[in-house]
Amino acid sequence: MRKLIAAVALLAAAGCSVSAGADDGRQTVVVGYQSKTINTVTAGTLLRGLGYLEKRLGDRYRVEWQDYDTGAPITAKMVAGKIDIGSMGDYPLLINASRTQGVPSARTELVSVTGYNLRGGLNAVVVPPSSDVETLADLKGKKVSASSGSAGHGTLVQALERAGLDPATDVEVVNQQPPVGASALQSGNVQGYAQFVAWPGLLVFKNQARLVYDGSALGVPTFHGVVVRQAYAKEHPDVLQAFLQAQIDATNYLHEHPLEAAEAVAEATGLPPEVVYLYNGRDGIASFDVTVKPQLLAALRHDEKYLKIIGTDFTDVDVTKFANDSSIRKAYGASYDAGTASTVNAARITGTDEACGTAVRDPAKAGELWLAGEDRLRPAATPTCLLRQIAAATSAGGTVRAAYVPDAATGTHWFADKSVWVRDPSADENERFAPFTTRDGAQAYVKEHPRARIVGYDEALKAAAGGASR
């Protein structure tokens, strides 16, 4: 693990190109990626750090890695023929297709997926911790930071519509890059922040924001994928195959070593490993799978309407022509169709719950506890069992780095101490406490369960530890 972290750090320090200025007769393949958009790490940060692409290409090529905050500059450079392969989110993918389809030399195609969430949990809206905003409807008349044309922006528009607001008039959307918007939220220049992985989780983890809308509430799939210039793919099919095979290698590594992968990505990006693991760890918010699933293509078609609302000079895209899984099918092998049909997260939480003495089987309830000084996470069968583990560990002098629980309604993994907890005395003994990512979700549960009530995290922890939940 330390060797991997050191390799990632070395590459990150080297700048955009791993072999800039080399004049050794090799051709250069230029890869655009977003290091901090950690749902793309198997085609970007982690792949780069592991060196799998360079190993696959051998001495024929050198790889130039170009890092950006969003997908927009990657698309601009692909149009100009200056980036050969890139990775970005679903909305930017559509913009990429729209901008390149009229330029034969720049036309792109979607060739693989990096990570996805079938409910939309990779995007979220947050507000300052002290804000009186409890629901999206409370943002009416306020300023919300978003990156125009991003998946986070698209989620905001859809969510506002569902909340009965007009995205064009009821909320002022301020177009900002993620780090700029984060600063604007802290300074009070905007009252909300709609972004993609990993920015919402980062701000919440740092106590700089509170989650007010979980993208999972939309129930619309969101994902990130890999695009290649068609002309480049035809001229260099060997490079595309090497890239996709290397991406599969990196995906397998992440599944087999999720903690090591999270720590390596954290080292390269400066993100806290606890935040990276929230998204990319076992049963994390993102499922990493290279196959191009029909649900994801359907989501692209669904998203087109909202790109037109956003107003990004978007023209219709023939998703059927844009998506081409022939190359990833070849790299994946005979089990591709089975892989495409499966939506099971290959990195699962397993083991035995130490507090409740039961096997961890249900991903909809399973959580994990990460204690300082430990190189493994402790599995929990239910959120109530996790609370008991936390209480036992802290009473014994342990320090919690992070504890992860799934939202009782959407399944979105979130930080236990940042969740909204509900105590339900009518539930089974090991399921008396239910966590939710937002107060909205918790209140919806309470309305349907007359004996349930919202409690603070500390109260839930104390009750679970003392047996008061029984």
Image (cartoon, rainbow, N blue to C red):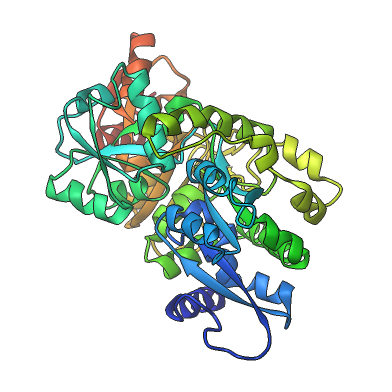
Q: Nearer the viewer, residue 83 or 418?
A: 83
Position of residue 430 in the picture relative to residue 425 (left or right): right
Does residue 130 appear in the picture of this structure?
yes
Position of residue 174 in the picture relative to residue 374 (left or right): left
Residue 312 percent coordinates (x, y)? 40, 39
Does residue 214 appear in the picture of this structure?
no
Q: Nearer the viewer, residue 125 or 129?
A: 125
Residue 333 percent coordinates (x, y)? 83, 52
Q: Quadrant of the C terminus?
A: top left
Instruction: Identify which residue is drawn at 55% across, 71% down.
Output: 49
Q: Tell me: residue 281, above or below residue 308.
A: below
Q: Tell me: residue 414, above or below residue 157.
A: below
Q: Nearer the viewer, residue 417 or 329?
A: 329
Residue 220 percent coordinates (x, y)? 51, 28
Residue lying at the far right in this picture: please name it.
Answer: 334
Q: Nearer the viewer, residue 347 or 399?
A: 347
Residue 305 percent coordinates (x, y)? 48, 27
Position of residue 123 in the picture relative to residue 11 (left or right): left
The image shows a total of numbered marks equal to 0
Q: Quadrant of the N terminus?
A: bottom right
Instruction: Identify which residue is drawn at 25% across, 51% down.
Output: 182
Instruction: Identify which residue is drawn at 48% across, 34% down.
Output: 120
